[in-house]
Image (spheres, helix red, strand yellow):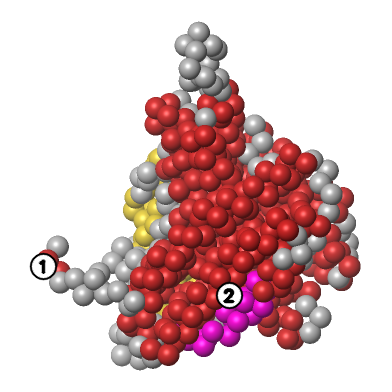
Amino acid sequence: MTFIDPRDIAFWLYDWLHADDLTRHSAYADHSRETFDAVLALSEQIATDLFANHYKKSDQVEPRLENGRAKVIPEIKQAMAAYAEAGLFAASFAPEFGGMGLPHVVDTASMAHFMAANIATAAYPMLTAANARVLVKFGTEAQIAGFAKPQIAGRSLGTMCLSEPQAGSSLADIATRAAPDGDDVLGPRYRLTGNKMWISGGDHDITDTIVHLVLAKIPGADGKLPPGTGGITLFIVPSVLADGTRNDISVAGLNHKMGYRGTTNCLLNFGEAGGAVGYRLGEAGQGLAIMFHMMNEARVFVGLGAAALAMRGYRQSLAYARERLQGRAGKDPASAPVPIIRHADVKRMLLAQKALAEGALSLILYCAHLMDRERVAADDAERARAASLLGLLTPVAKSWPSEFGLEANTLAIQVHGGYGYTRDFDVEQIYRDNRINPIHEGTHGIQGIDLLGRKIIRDKGVALAALGEEIVATVTRAEAFADLRSLATGLDIVWDHLVEVVQSLIALNDPARALDNASAFLSAFGHVVVAWLWLDQATVLRAQPAVDPAWADGKLRACRYFIEVELPKVAPLLMTVASLNDVAATMPEDAF
């Protein structure tokens, strides 16, 4: 089964986002639509043949510890070897680093195939690319040659090591320390001691070397760790040193997860035998600023994974609904049973999945499109606008697909009925795999605070105004089509309501109180953004004749469903935000 319809990919990339126009810019001049399509076809083939083939096995046969090392099933190694041989680790990196130089939007569409086929195995290259991108941006020539290029070639894999058992998402409370230990060709050398928790890909036998990017604090002159975020620095800590000896890193245990089981998830101890060797990346004290470059990419790809799993669940429940016979069209008990897709409630659940899953994936591709727009911008103003929109939408890209992709997966189970609750069908595993996405790389609550607190209130609504201009332009285009006018009006009204609420929060001048319902605002804001993206795509479909009328009609109906059925859910959420409802914030602990 194809987990993502190639017709959708082609529409999003070329008809909607015009990815082929990027080849007019020098950064992508070596490419054409033909090269993009070749990469996508190869990605779909490898994903189907070598990622999907062990989807259930990697869930049933979890990574295990043997002699202090994590071991994974051989199919994962085979998938990574094929991925590397195809050059896909290098897809979005510039040629000077050994990359293919593909646009981000094409690379993202490629990765969607792998995440839909096997999200756990796809996590290894996703983390590796994000790791290497930070090294390319902030590393020295020696660090890029020694640590980034092996990952771009697929010879090494990478991780990011932030969380600690006692700190979780509160990075100010990390206790891993880094003591200066001289210099060598790879930069200022340190010895790291401490513990890191929830490290995906933290240890495995897929490659000989793993490149860890580790946050740690450099002690002050008094030998004590600075309070808060002071002294937090990022270090390159390879599992194997240049002389071939293993670094002072040990696996204290594996975390056994509800889903995503094929990805090793480790508790790592650094420095049990004197200190793990690490090389400072960037300057001392810049660790958080540098790491957030990796985190922001990872957050978009978390959203991509959630969207891809929503797409897979939708496609599999659609296939099931067409085959499963149950119930009859009329009242004649002697008539033949009909496929359940003919029942109105099943159609409702399928249409809801389609609207949520395709809306989620279009959101992620739009964000990747903004990355490309930022890179090829003609001037500083255009570049700043793309960066501003991307910054505003990053918490939405992470959280909205994670929240509502999971809702789509719930509907996929429901379409399957009792069978969906068994291990005979993939949809129960798809749900379990997707359940982590509202949690990792910053929970829904953290993303809500980031969106409302940092990206809107602190920004005084500047990025929000830029988004508003994009929405107004879409509404104006949509009004030219009779069947889209009411949808355009519906979006326009809700957007105005959201802006009024934001203005009231900014005028309140009390950020703490304004953020009491940030999670509700995030859900509402995400719904408005996805409604806009659906309407924008509808204007494209209406402006050109469809090669496949039934397929195009399905998209237009999904747009109508989202704006008529989903978008009205925004009003009560905004009412909660605007009213400064404090029932949760003021709840006494002893009242629970």
Q: What amino acid is found at the position of numbered circle 2 in the picture?
A: Gly
Label 1: element kind: helix
Where is mark 1, residue-wise? 590
Mark seen at residue 532: none
Q: In the rendered structure, does residue 483 fall within the stretch colored magenta?
A: no
Q: Say which of 216 and 423 sits in front.
A: 423
Q: Residue 503: give x, y in percent of width and height.
A: 47, 85
Mark seen at residue 391: 2
Q: Residue 75: give x, y in percent of width and height.
A: 57, 35
Label 2: element kind: helix
Task: Please state, as top left, top right, bottom left or bottom right, where the N terminus lies in the image.
Answer: top right
N-term mark: 2 or 1: 2
Mainly helix, strand or loop, the magenta region?
Answer: helix
In the image as oriented, which residue stretches furthest toward the top? 334
- Which residue does the image show at 59% across and 66% down from the upper left? 491
Q: Residue 463: give x, y in percent of width and height.
A: 59, 81
- Would residue 375 appear left or right of 226 to someone viewing this image? right
Rendered position, 230 above or below 303: below
Q: Say which of 370 and 133 sits in front.
A: 370
Q: How many marks?
A: 2
Q: Quadrant of residue 475?
A: bottom right
- Would residue 268 appear left or right of 41 to someone viewing this image? left
Q: In the rendered structure, does residue 463 fall within the stretch colored magenta?
A: yes
In the image as oriented, which residue stretches furthest toward the left? 590
**Chain part drawn in magenta:** 457-471
- Which residue does the image show at 15% across and 72% down from the upper left? 588
- Which residue does the image show at 50% across and 40% down from the upper left? 349
Q: Residue 343: give x, y in percent of width and height.
A: 52, 30
Rendered position, 152 above or below 382: above
Q: Residues within 10 Å of mark 2 (few under 14, many from 20)?
A: some
- Which residue does the image show at 58% across and 64% down from the upper left? 490
